Image (cartoon, rainbow, N blue to C red):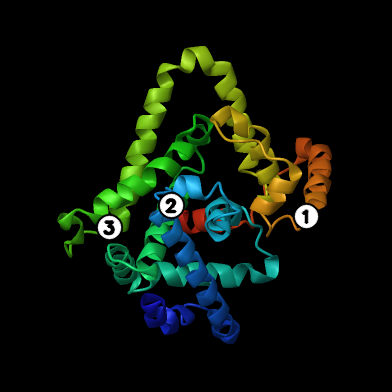
Amino acid sequence: MLLFDDLQLQLISLYPEPLRPVVEAGLPALKFQMMRLAFEVMEAESTGTVFASAVHRPGDYPLMARCHFGIVDILQYEVPSNARDNVISVFERVQSWQNLEVFRRAAFCRAAGDGPEAALMRFVLYQAIRFNLWVLTWDEPSVEAVGVMQRLDSEAEQTLRKRLMMPSTYDEAVRPLHILVAEALEAAQRGLTDAAIDLPQRFGELLEFNLAILKARELCAADAVLVRNEYSTHIGEEKLGSIRLAERHPHLFPSSCAVDTRRSRLTRALPGKTASRTRLIDIIHDAMSREVAP
């Protein structure tokens, strides 16, 4: 992982000094997991399995699946109060990091190559598109309600691969990730426009989904997974049982019993549930609002 090796020291410097020894100690394990993920992606690509399909086959591609579904989980992960300042500090340092765009361009250029690291970068960029679109549309539950986010999972890889084939995308004045995210936003808007055609027939149904999704976006990660699973069939996804939910989100549910226990508690608490303001998505949105404030 040459790109990762080159960036290690720079990435460590983005953390507050007291945390740097801990981060540095964890880098070998992280690199090993990245190598495993890279070979999973290579295997999927070698068999013609698109990312959107591979992530639904955790038996074959466990790390790809965990990364894919963990994107939304991490946004709704409740940051402990004693860690909030450190998380904000890291986020702000990343945003102001002078080599951030250099890293993005290097990742895109590497993704056009061959080998494990190139495969890993393609999957990372695919997930980066999804992550950005989730953040940018978080206050628009209708995007999820009409199936736009699900469609993005299928289309983002194709868009990425087309861009990797375009010489103009490698121009020094071009920001590849910005273009990919902008194209995803345009596709999301087209999806909403297309859905509006069916709005008179589905108004009541979509209103119900919007309210359910809005509630899901107010919750912590574990509760949100359960709520989303309840309406998954309405947007073309499969509703999972407790065992498969635990397999898909092992960082949230250590067992199927944990899923059942959480579901029971959620059923009793949901009517009066209030939004947490310590989740990662809240921290990101707070930072974004400060950037645009006059």
Left or right: 168 with respect to 79?
left
- Residue 65, given in percent of the width and then of the height, sits at 56, 54
Residue position for label 3: 176
Question: Residue shown at 39%/56% (left/top)?
Answer: 46
Q: How far apart are marks 3 and 2 (CA)?
A: 13 Å
First in residue order: circle 1 vs circle 3: 3
Q: Distance between the residues labelled 1 and 3?
A: 40 Å
Disc 1 crowd, CA 10 A, few/some/many (<14, 14-19, 20+): some
Residue most extreme to the top: 201
Q: Distance between the residues labelled 1 and 2?
A: 30 Å
Q: What residue type is labelled 3?
A: Pro
Q: Can residue 19 be seen in this view?
A: yes
Left or right: 90 with respect to 82?
left
Disc 3 crowd, CA 10 A, few/some/many (<14, 14-19, 20+): many
Q: What residue type is labelled 1?
A: Ser
First in residue order: circle 3 vs circle 2: 2
- The mark found on residue 275 in the picture is none
Residue position for label 2: 132
Q: How many labels does the image show?
A: 3
- Residue 150, given in percent of the width and then of the height, sits at 48, 38
Considering only vertical position in the picture, is 14 above or below 72? below
Question: Residue shown at 42%/21% (left/top)?
Answer: 196
Q: In which quarter of the image is the N terminus?
A: bottom left
Question: Residue shown at 65%/70% (left/top)?
Answer: 83
Residue position for label 1: 255
- Mark 2 falls on what kind of element? helix
Q: What residue type is labelled 2?
A: Asn
